[in-house]
Amino acid sequence: MNDTPDRSLTWGQGLVLGAAALPMVAFGGMGGWGTYSNITSVFHRSATALGVVAAGEGAPLVLALVLVGLTMLGQSAPAAVRVGLWTLPAVASLTGAAVAKTVTEAVVFAVTPMAMCVSAEGMGLLARRIVVYRTGVDAEAQRRNATVMQRLAYHRARAANHPDEKARQASELKSWKLAERVGTGDAQLGVHLVDVQRERMTAGADAALAGMFALPVTAVTAPAVETATTPEPLAVEGPAVTGVTPPVTEEDTQVTDESETFEPEPVTPDTDPVTPPVTLEEIAAVAGVPVPVTGEPLTDAQLVVVLRHLRYSDDPPLSYRQAVAAFREGGFVGGEQRVRKAWGSLMSHEESEA
């Protein structure tokens, strides 16, 4: 599927491309007229000259039109068309050089037919670039890459399974040579590779900045419960009252001087100080998630559990970079984006608790 939307040529682009195509057609026609004049000066017969022009420049013109038409339709040109664009003008050049009477004439007669060859190639290339610009599809590059990949697949299979050792070695070397040609001339492939590398560089820079600017957050511990203490007795004039006065009896209606003192019993809190979970299993149980296992994909909640366990495995708590390093060394599986998101969730939870 093509990700590049269709783009139309602007009025200025169309004008410039049309102006560039006109000289190609003009010089190609001038090359044909030059060949006709050269042959006529030797044979003095127009029919012979027209035959040479038809074979040497007329046929390449037909192939050039076929090339342009196929290119505009988004199709690659057959190999016979590309070979004919260069072979037929070369034959006309050899014919002109053979019939020339002098060396100077031979050089001139040989060079003249090449004007049609260059004009045909130029028009084909221009049409191809227009199609690539508008659709984003380079049919010629796709054809070459498909051919290379087909040959590469054959030689890899031959290098792996052929019974002859020499044949395997030859295919191994050939496959490495073909691998060098994969993607050659494919501009769309180059753009996609640049996009992939740009995303990786962005992710790496984001992770580095997150590690540099992450502020350490202290561990949240349960508040300590203060032990109730017995208040000191109030200082009053007269005998110190240090305890509970016994009741008045019939034998003695006065308060006795001696009073019994009672040691106050210490008041204990209803609950012991809360101890945060230490092991990974305990943290996973508190969070209500399965215990994370190394080497297996983890959910977002499990990532938070693992990072919390690693962060408070040392005193002071680990930073983001240290926690990520411990995460990788521990064999846990998680992408950089998901780990960074889980770390942010952990920091937000700690700040809210604080």
Image (cartoon, grey):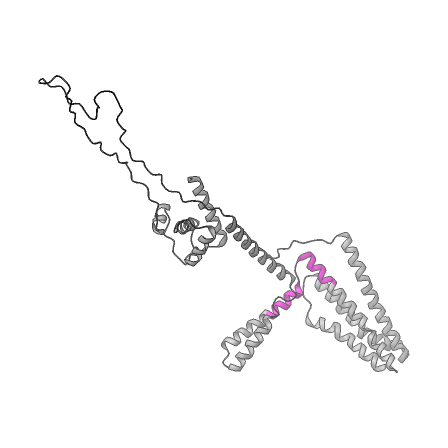
Magenta highlight range: 126-148
Quarter of the image holding residue 246?
top left
Q: Residue furthest left?
A: 251
**231 or 209, which lies in front?**
231
Quarter of the image holding residue 217?
top left
Position of 249 compared to 122: left or right? left
Which residue is depicted at the point 54% across and 76% down?
172
Position of 38 compared to 305: left or right? right
**Magenta-highlighted stretch: main secondary structure?**
helix
**225 or 83, which lies in front?**
225
Q: Is residue 30 magenta?
A: no
Classify 254 as above or below 183: above
Horizontal and vertical percent position of residue 299? 43, 51
Position of 236 compared to 143: left or right? left
**193 or 25, which lies in front?**
193
Q: Is residue 130 magenta?
A: yes
Q: Quadrant of the N terminus?
A: bottom right
Horizontal and vertical percent position of residue 231? 28, 29
Q: Quadrant of the C terminus?
A: top left
Which residue is depicted at the point 44% across and 57% down?
328
Horizontal and vertical percent position of residue 327? 43, 55
Which residue is depicted at the point 69% across and 56% down?
134
Horizontal and vertical percent position of residue 36? 86, 74
Classify 261 as above or below 152: above
**133 or 92, which lies in front?**
133
Callout count:
0
Which residue is depicted at the point 40% across and 57% down?
294
